Amino acid sequence: MNRAARALLLLAAVPFTLGAAKPRLVPDVSQSRIEIQYSFTGAELLLFGAILYPGGRVPDEAADIAVVVKGPVQPLVIREKQKVAGIWMNVDSARFRSAPAFYAVASSRPLAKLVDERMAAIYELGVQNLQLSPGSGLAPEVQRRFETGLIELMQRKQLYSENPTGVQITGGVLYRARIRIPARVPVGNYTAETFLIKDGRVLAGAVRDVRVEKLGFERFVARAADRWSLAYGLVAVGLSLFLGWAAGAFFQRR
Amino acid sequence: MDVYLPIAGISVNALVIIALGGVVGLLTGMIGVGGGFLTTPILIFYGIPPAVAVASATTQITGTSVSGVLAHRRRRGVDYRMGSVIIAGGLVGALAGGGLFRLLQETGQIDTAIALLYVVLLGAIGLLMGKEAATALDIIKPRDGAAARKPRRHNPIIASLPMRWRFYQSGLYISPLAPLLLGFVGGMLTVLLGVGGGFIMVPAMIYLLGMSAQVVVGTSLLQILFVTAATTLIHATTTKSVDVVLAGLLLLGSVIGAQFGARLAQKAKPELLRMFLAIIILAVALRMAIGLGWRPDDIYTVQLL
């Protein structure tokens, strides 16, 4: 699902929130920019905010919160290794047109208890509900196998994650969730979505944009490698020639 | 001390990378091999994407071969004429290798191809070198037949090639096609495996071409210098996977390690050094072979389009 469609969907949820007896959501994120610098080992994104109940009273059955941080979507090929003549090598493959580079969901209670499958699929809540847009016309069960493989692989790399108790709600009104962004995430536009859920329905939703970008020297290097690749290569060769020569000259004099 | 590698896209411990460069440099200085065959696999084991490991290791080898070339030049141990022919072959080989690299990457067989080539090449070289060193150290006795037969200086197939040139410093009068082809193979391996190819070139120059021993190492280093530099450029412009920070860290360790290695080499017995190298080569080959046959942790791999 693309960004515009999601925004529309969230907008569609707004009328519900305007109803007099519905609680409202005031969300925020700790930073709108994650900077990848020379000793970047990952970052922690804090999603927090308040639930405003009508009349300021917290009902006996409080609403739940789910937060989703999603990275830019990218087309990819996933390959499956099989044993051929004693060697494990890539045999089968499948394409996905748009798999998110990063996906993390945290909620105040396990997702299965918050929403049914249909709602989970609509709002892409949970790694099993990601819309990966298969790009190769494979049989559904084969496609399913690759999807499972992809999700498990991304989970092991900590690029996809689910935390069923990651959102803490204080006093029924203040919520906070920490989402860990590992070092190997790609740069791009990320979204931090917050959903207010009650009785299996999404009452309110809000999106904040988070930009992950390389800065300073790291950005310069990545950009140079991409845009001025020949000059970049020449500099790399020059650097190695110089270091090799310098060490030789230095040690000879001693 | 964590350092973020801008092209590889991950953070690594800078000291580990410098130490790895140092160990590889030590070997380079002691034995005269580029050490790429060690750097690339270890970087891959460490979690660097294979393409970045191959490309950046190539950049590092350029640096370590510089001081070697300069040292051999002072001793008149470089045959420039032979060197240029091999380099010409190497550049064509590097370009062809670049095309093959991309083809293998697209079909998803690059990792398997790299590992297989490593196992076959390192296994064969390691066994040959180990056997030779063990014979020299009197650990194993040479067979009577082998000792009696004097090795032929000129390979009959190479001698029959047309269009002979005179290579004075190598003491050869042979067709340039043979070193050209040798250079081609070396250049291809450089692109595919991130190795200088010295461990193939040196034996081939001695046993196949029959070059005189004084110029073999210097000429091989000259070829490595030019071909790895060209390969860095090819990787930088096609795969865009040269990580200058990673290469810089490796270089920092290896150029210093190489100087210490050169000093150590003067004190140690060359046969012992070769035995030592053979054991390392066989260990790397074995590790690679196990990696191929063992069920990998991840059956699935992802490649971005």
Image (tube, rainbow, N blue to C red):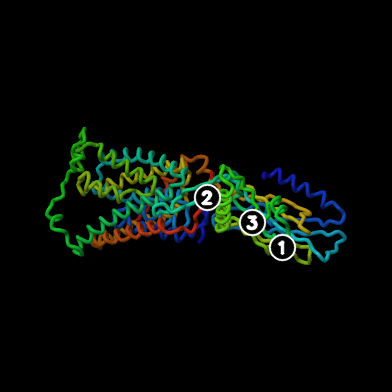
The residues tagged by marks 2 and 3 sit, at their Cα atoms, a distance apart of 19 Å
Q: Tell me the crowding category of disc 3: few under 14, some 14 to 19, or many 20 or more residues within 10 angstroms, Cα based.
A: many
Marks 2/1 in contact by CB < 8 Å: the verdict is no
The residues tagged by marks 2 and 1 sit, at their Cα atoms, a distance apart of 32 Å
Give the residue pinned by disc 2. B302
Give whichever of A105, A236 is nearer the camera.
Answer: A105
The residues tagged by marks 3 and 1 sit, at their Cα atoms, a distance apart of 14 Å
Q: Quadrant of the C terminus of chain B?
A: top right
Q: Looking at the image, which residue is at 21% across and 48% down?
A: B207
Give whichever of B86, A141 is nearer the camera.
Answer: A141
**Residue B265: x %, y % from top left:** 27, 60
Q: Amino acid at mark 3?
A: Ala
**Residue A37: x %, y % from top left:** 57, 54
Q: Is residue A236 visible?
A: yes
Give the residue pinned by disc 1. A108
Label 1 marks a residue whose chain is A
Q: Looking at the image, which residue is at 42% across and 41% down?
A: B234
As drawn, the label of residue B5 is: none
Label 3 marks a residue whose chain is A
Image quadrant in which you'd find residue B186: top left
Q: Looking at the image, which residue is at 36% across and 43% down?
A: B188
The reply to whether label 3 and label 1 mark residues of one chain is yes
Give the residue pinned by disc 3. A104
* Element carrying mark 1: loop
Q: Amino acid at mark 1?
A: Ser
**Residue A95: x %, y % from top left:** 55, 45
In the visual, does B228 lie left or right of A232?
left
Q: Nearer the viewer, mark 2 or mark 3?
A: 2
Q: Is residue A245 visible?
A: no
